[in-house]
């Protein structure tokens, strides 16, 4: 059995006044230091799963939860308020993350550390480091409410990373970012993984999940319908039937295979695709 | 069909921050174009000037021969509809139906025409099933379609979609592609801002790259996605199919997976 950061056992959750559960009988383990990508069509229950793992549901959202959620082996009520330091949570809508009580981005990113009672010198150092890492230094003196959607997303991410939690739950952090900003968020997340953090990421950009995640979970209608290595899950041509796009190179690989192009496996990353296709081509040209 | 023209347009926000610097552009009536570029490149400012939410601080914006400087935003917005980047800045009604009905009502079209417009807009955006729901009970990606339906119901000649692909899943993107085709058949001029290069490669005739307050390059997707100089300036990448073709040394400025598959097979077979 793995050493789990978070483990769900037969979790079913229903929002207040809802007829049907948003999450149904879901069991999954998130091992310490792993990078988990959660994918699924909109409305599948991805965000609901995140708020359950963080304990916001049912505590804040109310509703009814059955089954068990264990964070490092302990139930969520056992943590009381300490869970805030253990799990960092980046909201899907960055507007919900901004405290609203701070006048500059610098102060906003400092806010969590102030609440944790970290000494001022240390706060400054950590905030400056994180702002460099997330490329928001030039926003330091701006009001958090004057930012574009993409900028606000990076500030929200920074304000959570600065807390250095062991576990990070990140809900669609790149939806409003340009391609370069998106790549940089994935690089930041990989750096966090290198620091042994456990990462749970909701994301529609499967091409990047393919490249970075250790494991992928697919949700549909509140149920976990698949879980496994990216190379297995994201090369499965039936994935679009679940409302999830395939990586572009997997689409291309499948088209080629159907035309009789001899590839050994369906690639899911750019690098794999180039290698796989080159190998097949050189095999051909090697013939007499 | 009215052409849309930007003539040496600059825009500075109050306080002096310049967001657009001497941009000139002609969008032919009935065309379907995408604008791509980094966050902060000036894309949203540029399109907000097209429907007079903002007026240029220098230069002129013309819709046909109508100069936005000489008209109110209310007048211009009957010809150019703008779907906000953040749907929550646009939505203010308690049901999807009343939200979509708001625009047509201001046009005083009569009940029958209003109903027809709302019904058609809800149908094409896939929002019929949410007709009586409160928009704020629905996910963000669905709220985006409600705001698109509101503009389609206005039936403006020009429509601008600001990042409709943000946060969309596979079916959301398919729906958007259908909406674009539908509007193109109705000979609308549609201008879409997007960060999704695969979507742009598959769904547009013309693409404009913006970087640092200016237009870097305008052209067909095949042209712009193989213009490494322009992509570099705007810090953009090629779509995956193009990247693979480049790595394999396959010619032909390919940008879509099906064309890439054909080209790889041709190379393989020869």
Image (spheres, rainbow, N blue to C red):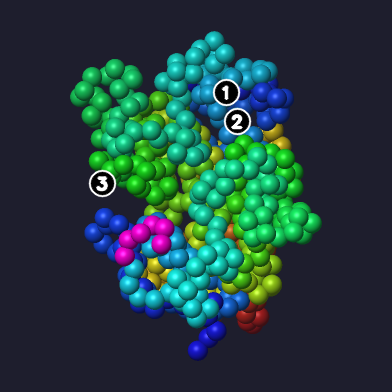
Tell me, yes or no, whether the highlighted magenta stretch contains residue A60. yes
Question: Separation of disc 3 and disc 1 at Cα?
Answer: 35 Å
Answer few, some or many: residues within 10 Å of disc 3's Cα (few below 14, many 20 plus, some between 14 and 19).
Answer: few
N-term mark: 1 or 2: 2
Tell me, yes or no, whether the highlighted magenta stretch contains residue A228. no
Q: Which mark is residue B129?
A: 3
Which x, y percent locates residue B173? 43, 50
Which x, y percent locates residue B3? 52, 22
Tell me whether marks 1 and 2 sit on the same chain: yes
Seen at 66% across and 65% down, the residue is A164
Q: Which mark is residue B54?
A: 1
Determine which residue is flagged by label 2.
B45
Q: Give me the chain letter of mark 1.
A: B
Q: Which span of residues is magenta-colored?
A: A59-64
Q: Are marks 3 and 1 in contact (CB under 8 Å)?
A: no
Which x, y percent locates residue B247? 67, 63
């Amino acid at each position: 059995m793995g050493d789990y950061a978070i483990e769900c056992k037969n979790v079913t959750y229903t929002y207040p006044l809802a007829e049907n559960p948003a999450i149904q009988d879901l069991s999954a383990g998130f091992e310490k230091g792993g990078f988990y990508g959660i994918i699924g069509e909109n409305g599948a229950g991805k965000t609901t799963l995140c708020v359950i793992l963080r304990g916001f549901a049912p505590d804040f959202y109310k509703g009814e939860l059955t089954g068990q959620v264990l964070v490092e082996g302990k139930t969520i009520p056992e943590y009381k308020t300490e869970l805030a330091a253990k799990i960092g949570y980046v909201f899907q809508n960055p507007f919900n993350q901004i405290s609203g009580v701070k006048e500059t981005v610098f102060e906003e990113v400092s806010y969590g550390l102030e609440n944790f009672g970290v000494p001022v010198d240390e706060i400054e150092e950590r905030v400056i480091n994180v702002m460099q890492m997330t490329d928001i230094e030039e926003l330091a003196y701006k009001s958090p409410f004057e930012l574009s959607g993409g900028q606000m997303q990076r500030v929200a991410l920074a304000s959570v990373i600065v807390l250095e939690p062991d576990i990070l739950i990140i809900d669609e952090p790149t939806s409003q970012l340009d391609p370069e900003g998106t790549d940089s968020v994935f690089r930041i997340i990989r750096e966090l993984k290198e620091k042994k953090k456990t990462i749970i990421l909701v994301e529609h950009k499967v091409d990047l999940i393919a490249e970075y995640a250790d494991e992928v979970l697919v949700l549909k209608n509140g149920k976990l319908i698949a879980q496994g290595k990216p190379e297995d899950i994201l090369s499965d041509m039936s994935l679009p039937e679940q409302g999830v796009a395939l990586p572009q190179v997997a689409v291309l690989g499948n088209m080629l295979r159907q035309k009789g192009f001899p590839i050994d496996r369906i690639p899911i990353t750019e690098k794999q695709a180039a290698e796989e296709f080159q190998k097949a081509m050189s095999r051909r040209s090697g013939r007499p | 069909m009215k052409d849309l023209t930007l003539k040496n347009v600059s825009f500075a926000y109050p306080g002096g921050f310049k967001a657009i610097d001497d941009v000139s552009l002609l969008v032919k009536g009935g065309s379907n174009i995408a604008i791509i570029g980094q966050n902060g490149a000036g894309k949203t400012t540029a399109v907000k000037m097209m429907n007079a939410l903002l007026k240029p601080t220098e230069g002129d914006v013309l819709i046909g021969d109508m100069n936005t400087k000489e008209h109110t935003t209310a007048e211009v917005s009957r010809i150019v509809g703008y779907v906000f980047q953040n749907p929550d800045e646009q939505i203010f009604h308690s049901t999807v139906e009343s939200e979509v009905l708001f625009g047509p009502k201001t046009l005083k079209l009569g009940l029958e025409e209003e109903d027809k417009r709302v019904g058609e807009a809800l149908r094409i955006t896939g929002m019929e099933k949410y007709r009586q729901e409160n928009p704020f009970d629905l996910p963000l990606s669905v709220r985006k379609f409600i705001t698109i339906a509101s503009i389609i119901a206005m039936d403006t000649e020009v429509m601008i979609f600001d990042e409709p692909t943000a946060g969309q899943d596979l079916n959301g993107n398919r729906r958007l592609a259908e909406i674009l085709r539908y509007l193109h058949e109705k000979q609308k001029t549609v201008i879409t801002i997007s960060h999704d290069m695969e979507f742009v490669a598959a769904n547009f005739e013309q693409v404009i790259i913006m970087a640092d307050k200016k237009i870097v390059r305008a052209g067909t997707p095949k042209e712009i996605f193989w213009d490494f100089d322009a992509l570099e300036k705007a810090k953009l990448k090629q779509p995956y199919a193009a990247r693979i073709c480049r790595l394999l040394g396959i010619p032909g400025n390919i940008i879509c997976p099906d064309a890439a598959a054909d080209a790889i097979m041709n190379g393989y077979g020869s």
